[in-house]
Structure formats: structure tokens, C-alpha cells
Image: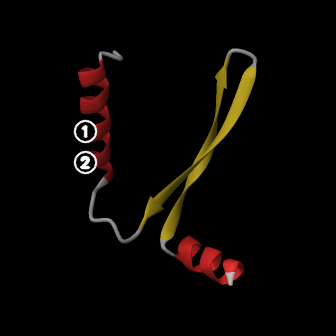
Amino acid sequence: MQEEKTAENKANYIDGGNFKARIGNTTYLVGVFFNKAKKVTIEDRMKNLICQEVTAGNF
């Protein structure tokens, strides 16, 4: 049952690749996935992230 659900969930996502980010002495491997069912574009996502960072004062 769990394997079936995992396979179904994976089918709904597009693999966006991965990248490494190093913070201090720790290296993180970050995976990026996009939900096929969402109607939000990458441009919309980036605008939202930028607005959140500006609002939080993280610039």
C-alpha cells in the first residue's frame, strides 16, 4: 500500500534536478521537484520568493 502511494505521488511531480549548497562545514544536497497539477509558473514562484524575502528583510 505504501509503495503504491509513493509511486502515485512521484508520478505527479517533475524532477527539476538537484544542487549542492555549502553552509559552513556542511554540504547539503538539495533536490528540486515541481508538481504537475499546479498552474503556477516558475516566474510566479520566483516573484513570490522575492516578495517573501523583501517582506522579511532578508536582502
In terms of image quadrants, where is residue 50?
Answer: top left
- Compared to residue 47, the image places residue 23 above or below, namely above
* Residue at 70% across, 79% down: 3
Instruction: Check residue 44 in the rendering and tell me which mark sits there, or answer none.
Output: 2
Instruction: Check residue 26 in the rendering and tell me which mark sits there, or answer none.
Output: none
Say which amino acid is labelled 1: Lys
- Compared to residue 24, the image places residue 9 above or below, namely below
**In the rendered structure, are the residues bearing label 2 and label 1 in contact, judged by CB atoms less than 8 Å apart?**
yes
* Residue at 27% across, 58% down: 40
The residues tagged by marks 2 and 1 sit, at their Cα atoms, a distance apart of 5 Å
Q: Label 1: which residue?
A: 47
Q: Secondary structure at mark 2?
A: helix
Looking at the image, residue 13 sits to the left or right of residue 58; the answer is: right
Quadrant that contains the C terminus: top left
Q: Position of residue 55 (x, y in %)?
A: 24, 23
Say which amino acid is labelled 2: Asp
- Compared to residue 2, the image places residue 41 above or below, namely above
In terms of image quadrants, where is residue 23?
Answer: top right
* Residue at 32% across, 36% down: 49
Q: Secondary structure at mark 1?
A: helix
* Residue at 30% across, 15% down: 57
Count neighbours of disc 1 (C-alpha within 10 A) and say few if under 14, some if 14 to 19, many if 20 or more: few
Quadrant that contains the N terminus: bottom right
Q: Position of residue 14 (x, y in %)?
A: 50, 65
Please name whichever residue, 54 or 15, is drawn nearer the observer in this view of the structure.
Answer: 54
